[in-house]
Amino acid sequence: MCLGIPGRIVEMRHDTGLPMGVVDFGGVRREVCLAYVADEVSVGDYAIVHVGFAISKVDEEEAHRTYQVLREMGELEELSWIREAADAAASVDAPGRPTGTQSDGVGPSAPRADA
Amino acid sequence: MKYLAEYRDPKLARSLVDRIRREATRRWTLMEVCGGQTHTIVKQGINEVLSDAVEMIHGPGCPVCVTPLEQIDRALHLAARPDVVFTSFGDMLRVPGSECDLFQIKAKGGNVRIVYSPLDAVELARRSPDKEVVFFAVGFETTAPANAMAVWRAKEQGVRNFSVLVSHVTVPPAMVAILDAPDNRVQGFLAAGHVCTVMGWTEYEPLALRYRVPIVVTGFEPLDILEGIWMAVRQLEDGRHEVENQYVRSVRREGNRPAQELVERVFQVVDRGWRGIGVIPASGLGLREEFADFDAERKFALGFIRADEPAECRAGDVLRGRIKPFECPAFGAACTPESPLGAPMVSSEGACAAYYNFGRFRRAAGED
């Protein structure tokens, strides 16, 4: 229910006093009420949209920073895995504990479209 | 899509999983509050992959699931009236009332329509002056600003044939109810990222302090959830209990002020019943007196409709984290997504439906 999808604002206007606009979600465009973010967004910005309302402007710097931190963390882990694997040359096929198979592990998923 | 795909990277997910499992010196019990998070956790198997480090209890954060039976019955009563066009978000249509659901009313000729935005319902009312258009205003704090705007616009534009059947709930009182329960096992929370996008997290600071529980404001993608779990585990391992924000790309401490202001002008805090749980004091929103003309319960005098919940459905115990869905005797037998007894089996965000749809019950039942 609280699903919010990030999209890029491509158009802004007023509809009898109400800030409205068009937001592009990876090619799909929808009418969105911008009343709650009108003071901080302009065309080209990303916003999180919930039931036809933008509820926040995506902080692109923070989005980038979070991802970078995660990626660096991932790279460090990769290095330690390689080291562990080298140390335990006898049992190279099991560095660390198993993390499950592809099907029940963590993987990419398609965006959901509910309310 | 930008800001989605990068938070689903399986390689990064694996490194976070390893990190959580390595840093947890014991098995911690966490609750994710939001149903959207439950969906991701069960679908991606995050709870299974981390089962030796954390137990995830699925909280009551699915508005569809906690809307009381009584309110569903009122919706059904309205939808069956020939003068009413009943509008709702799609996921409310299959929630079982005492005798049927909105889909069945629609099949029998009731005018039930799914809307994408509550403003669509106001527009429908403006274009259908000979009909009464009722919108089913359910949801948490995330949805309240949208529903408040619909009522505000209807009043501003003089759309008198529009009204809302309100069943709004708020998260912090439910967390307090969980923490106050004598059998509470929750040691840390993942707070709902979009609720906090609207409300900020200042309400959670006194809770973290008073109950000595870490609360991590968390997003919805697999990496967000794993990072949120990792932050909560780290706090527990360090003996800290603070509010931290994982979902920094959307949430600020003060939240969305313009949204809070309109919610405050249109709604007031009221006691609300939660399906399977009962009434929680000051846990919901109702229309303020100056918007009473837009309150469907008053307009159509619905107070006489009362309902008792079916005894064999243990939704309340699931929503409070007392049992896992597969521990309910009705799970997968008397209760399936095709023929649900309780709302958590209906919504894609309900814990019962998530376990059923992703086949988590067989393995989990054998192992847990």
Image (cartoon, rainbow, N blue to C red):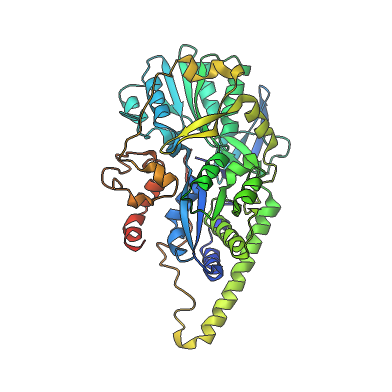
Q: Residue furthest top?
A: B130
The foreground one among A30 and B96 is: B96
Q: Is residue A112 above or below residue B54?
A: above
The foreground one among B113 and B152 is: B152
Determine whether, in the image, residue B299 is placed left or right of residue B152.
left
Q: How many marks?
A: 0
Q: Is residue B11 above or below residue A37?
A: below
Q: Position of residue A86 (x, y in %)?
A: 53, 85
Q: Position of residue B55 (x, y in %)?
A: 46, 59
Quadrant that contains the C terminus of chain B: bottom left
Q: Residue at x 41, y 23 (%)?
A: B74
Q: Residue furthest bottom?
A: A90
The foreground one among B277 and B3 is: B277
Q: Is residue B88 above or below residue B350?
A: above
| Camera sees residue B301 | yes
Q: Residue at x 53, y 63 (%)?
A: B13
